[in-house]
Amino acid sequence: MPHACPLRFLPGDPIIVFNASSADDVPQPPKVLTTALEILANVKSLMDGHDPLIVTFTERQQRFQSYVVDVDRDSGTFALDELIPRDGERFLTNGEHFRVEGFHDGVRIAWESNGQFRVLDNENGRSYRGALPVEVIYHQRRNAFRAALKLSALVDVEVAGDKLAKPVRGKLLDVSATGCKLRFEGDITQQLQLGQVYDKFAAALPFGAITTPVELRYLHFEERLETTFAGVRFHNMSGLVQRNVERFVYQLQREARRFDKDDF
């Protein structure tokens, strides 16, 4: 394990304090959007950003992944991509009440639906078309700086716990005070479940290893790279772990600023 690396401040460096009382870091209250134009714009933003969605059915524990693949303003409808796992299709076509949640540029966009959806199967693949929601929850979360790691200095990570048959090991690509992006070799999408909380996420930070629960918010296998990318949100972090994460984010931010100065 690397030795502890004390922070050294350079003259003129701004001092950044990470805490819940910071004006830029306070979560904004959610807004309920009810106009057709607002709803259309936000559902379309999820489609344009190809942002993954978590679909949950009210009476069921399992979570499913999908994407918005079409928005039709004239008919007031939209289409969801084929649900993963596929067995969610049966619940949807039976008209079961479900909830959709996605994130676009740090904004949580969510809605509920209990309308009927039609199954479409054509050259573009399988999808489900139904009416646009009558209201959408728009929630701007805290503004957390996200710092990328250099490819030569990626941090080893491990996801483990009761919900996994065996641990999966990968690399930390970027990190913020609230979550991080991970990379794993090969296709591990069958081992992980979107929306699941894993109670043992370990990362070998320069100041020492941290362990904390995380919630899986994004999962995608890039076939041409033979690599799985995942996004996790820190879940119920202890004060010590939170301070170490924030310290690491600050160091990465400071190194990036110094690199920009040197390059200039």
Image: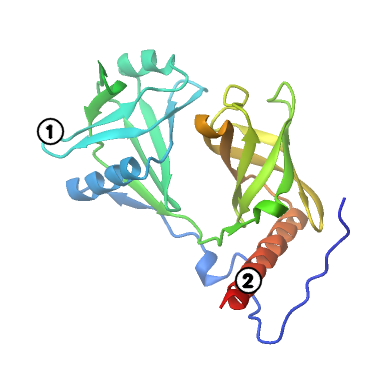
Depicted 113 relative to depicted 46: above or below: above
Disc marking residue 96: none
Q: Nearer the viewer, residue 231 or 138?
A: 231
* Residue at the disc numbered 2: 259
Q: Nearer the viewer, residue 184 or 202?
A: 184
Picture quadrant of residue 144? bottom right
Residue 233 placement (x, y as % from top left): 59, 45
Picture quadrant of residue 48? top left
Q: Is residue 123 left or right of residue 214?
A: left
* Residue at the disc numbered 1: 75
**What residue type is disc 2 on?**
Phe
Q: Which numbered disc flags the more N-terminal residue, 2 or 1?
A: 1
Q: Quadrant of the C terminus?
A: bottom right
The residue sitting at 62% across, 28% down in the picture is: 186
Residue 206 placement (x, y as % from top left): 79, 57
Q: Is residue 38 left or right of residue 251?
A: left
The residue sitting at 34% across, 43% down in the picture is: 46
Depicted 142 relative to depicted 237: above or below: below
Q: Is residue 151 shown to the viewer in this render?
A: yes
Other-residue count near label 1 (Cα within 10 Å), few / some / many at <14 / 14–19 / ≥20: few
